[in-house]
Amino acid sequence: MKLDERYNPRELEPRWQKYWEDHNTFNTGTEGDKEKFYCLEMFPYPSGRIHMGHVRNYAIGDVIARYKRMKGFNVLHPMGWDSFGMPAENAAIKHGVHPSKWTYENIEYMKTQLKRLGLSYDWSREIATCNPSYYRWNQWFFIKMLEKGLAYRKSSYVNWCSSCETVLANEQVINTQCWRCDNVVVQKELFQWFLKITDYADELLKGCDDLTGWPEKVVVMQKNWIGKSHGVEVDFPVDGVAEKIRIFTTRPDTLFGATFICLSPPHPLAKQLVADQAALEKITAQYGKVDEKIGLFTGHYCINPMTRKKIPVYVANFVLMEYGTGAIMSVPAHDQRDFDFAKEYGLPVMVVIQPAENSAGAGIVPGQECGQPQGLPLQEAYVEAGLLVNSGEFTGMQSEAAKEEIITYIEKKGLGKKVVNYKLRDWGISRQRYWGTPIPVVYCEKCGIVPVREADLPVILPEDVKFTGTGGSPLLVAESFLKTSCPTCNGPARRETDTMDTFVDSSWYFIAYCLGLNNLKFEQGVAVPELKYWMPVDQYIGGVEHAVLHLLYSRFYTRVVRDLGLTDVNEPFINLLTQGMVIKDGAKMSKSKGNVVDPNYLIEKYGADTSRLFTLFAAPPEKDLEWSDKGVEGAYRFLSRIWNLAFKYSDRPDGKALAGSDEVSSEVRGLLRKTHQTIRKVTSDIERELHFNTAIAALMELANEMSSFEPKEDRDYTAFSFALESMVLMLAPFTPHLAEELWAGISRGRGCVSEQAWPVWDEEMVREDEVELVIQVNGKMRGKITVAAGLPEESLKEAALGDAKTAESIAGKQIRKVIVVQGRLVNIVVG
RNA sequence: GCGGGAGUGGCGGAAUUGGCAGACGCGCUGGACUUAGGAUCCAGUGGGGCAACUCGUAGGGGUUCAACUCCCCUCUUCCGCACCA
């Protein structure tokens, strides 16, 4: 094929996209004996059109997928749509278009956009989570979890976003605000469906240590979110009432310093102990308020089981019902919150831990009981470990040892037990919205909650509903949906109207890709061959905003799927790359800031290859990328230069291959060396850290060298065409359309570039004949000389000392020491 | 407050193990070609100095023949968590 004189991406890019599509170039199966590689980018929500964040995410993934393909892997690289969610419903309310129509139209449009980027997806595996063929299995997993006790319904205080008119999971509340709309979230008591992710808390935590291919930061965030802590539960009997208050503490070494008890406002005993219910209601209203500690004396006292002293019982707004036992022992001397509370309510402070001498808190008075706040010896709580004082038989022990001893004592006396607590709570998945997976249960007057029979799945989301925007989910008034019969007794029953959190949909989509939307089929206890072949995902790429949310849920689901016997994989994602944001004018691109760059515009003006190249070149993938219009032009200029180089030499005869030993001019040798060095550099930059920016820089260097190379005779052309072919092959993952076109122009019918092998370098050809030797005097650079490569230390030393300029700078001085770094530098120490 | 990053020319960013700081690109300067240049090509480009030199990787100290890199302190900044007992 003959190349056009000018680089014309608008013409050639669609042509190659069609070629790949017509030839199913990127469709994959499990057959063959190649090693598999599963490359996955987080699938998008079909919001309407793609933005530069998508372009960056998918460009990164595409480089990896195409590179691995050329390296001989059987690559699975799928794409799909996280297509349930509120924007579709909001569009329905606002513009009267059905969520389904809105969603599918968006998918259609965004798909054409992705195709215009030349991404190497196997579209035959495309999934959309709003498709009944997909959410049917969402429902199936739910029923299985219900059977195993992993899904359950309970009434509890939940996070309610009044703007979204739905509850939110804990992971979806960011600084007391809704993750989606920033509305302040309030607590509301509701019946909700939960998934028992806490059953897997310990395994999810332990598994963190296996996530060696994840950014440290994300692993730490996961660990903190799970929040495991070791402690003890202790019963404090209530004086004069036949009740005990069970508290949880991680500091049993401070038990002797517990001078009061605090109950969480929703704690069942609070209602029982407090006489003034109005006051209790008042404090309940303050529950969860972070800026103020408010307490209410119950009028009752507990007996501290260690000191046998009477201590007052309070209801305190800062004590969480959801963590531990919903009740705490307060040790104001050694806990800042308790200290603040004690000061506010004039409660006694008892010092029971003394800092080790010379430590920060040394000098605090090992207090007697201090009844009045003004008499406090402490300005703040001493929260560190130390030596026990005023602690009966445990006085004189160190905190760590005392913890163990006291726990043993408590267990022996039957006062309580050692426990492990987690911050992680069960995942609330009920959403009071329409556009989501219906939760497949019915409420029967006789049988109560009954799951839908597997054979009756999927429970289809009805299409003929009205979107008024008031009064919650349209399912609440969809008679044909609501009315059903009980699967058990056939009597009248009502369907669940809550739908699932969309994070449920995305918790197993990577599993669905392994089969494709039309082949989804699972049976409990039957291992799925496709999962055995493809899972886990070898490389996952996406935004860091899912560090806890989606990634934790997916790790949980993968284990549930494993325990259903479908696979034996524990961790879904071996390597995780969290790509940085796309920044313009110092801020994340957003409509409200008016600093967005439209991918369509870029593709039309410069082409997909240029757009991809720039986003890959401007920064390493994990860092934020500062957008630069000029930088884009630079990328285009580079590709044009490559084009011109190829065009200029494309009709030259192809010479014989040169053996390394052939005698060639130093220019030819130089170009061949640079080419081999570039192959090595580009390969290692991709393999080592996915640093495409430096890989591309290396290709630019090679291009510069090629530009200044002037072939005259045959073997010059042979060397040049080797450089050019290598260049085109290495460009293929980054700028696939250009690479295809140039390959077609220079390769003389050797197939398409996407099916070529990645080039290999010859270590012998990489070697330099000569090296520049840096000469330092007392660590400062004083000159450079060129010497033959591989000289022994002694010769390098001689060469350096023999250099005229060096002699000048050390004249008249005593040489104390000479340090030689082989092949790099000589440092002469004089004095 | 706790935890984790980051700080390098005018800008985006390079610098495998401590071994030439500033690769590559953008921008800028000069030149060539041109009716023209916001196209293309060539040359130059950290600061200061005519120069030899000298100063330079947030700031201060230290280790070393040698420090962007290792250690200590300080500052700035971004991100995450934040009553989890």
Image: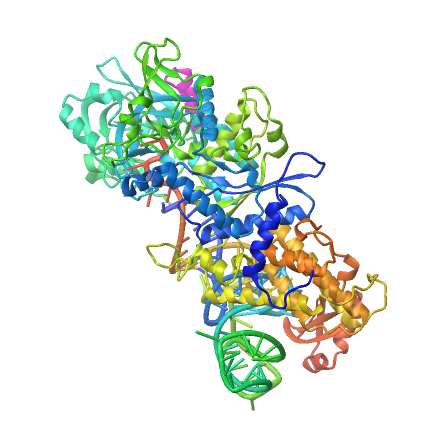
Q: Is residue A488 left or right of residue A320?
A: right
Q: How many marks do you count on the picture?
A: 0
Q: Position of residue A1 (x, y in %)?
A: 69, 60
Residue A227 visible, this orientation: no
Residue B25 screen position, x and y as percent: 55, 68
Q: Does A547 sit left or right of A121 as displayed? A: left
Residue B1 vertical placement versus A666 (above, below): above
Q: Is residue A376 above or below residue A478?
A: below
Which residues, given as a range, are shown in magenta?
Answer: A403-419
Nearer the observer, A179 or A416: A179
Q: Quadrant of the C terminus of chain A?
A: bottom right
Q: Residue furthest right?
A: A662
The residue that appears at 29% across and 40% down in the rendered structure is A96
- Residue closest to the eye, A373 or A642: A642
The location of residue A694, given as percent across then percent down, is 59, 59
Q: Quadrant of residue A334?
A: top left
Q: Can see residue A517?
A: yes
Among the 4 quarters of the image, the one containing residue A652: bottom right
Q: Is residue A711 above or below residue A9?
A: below
Residue A120 falls left or right of residue A460: right
Of A744 and A274, the residue lying toward us: A744
Return the residue nearer the eye: A741 or A68: A741
Tell me what residue is drawn at x 49 percent, y 52 percent: A55
Please tell me whether residue A818 belongs to the stretch shown in magenta. Answer: no
Residue A416 located within the stretch drawn in magenta: yes
Image position of A604 with respect to A134: above or below: below
Q: Please name the colour scheme applied to the rendered image.
A: rainbow
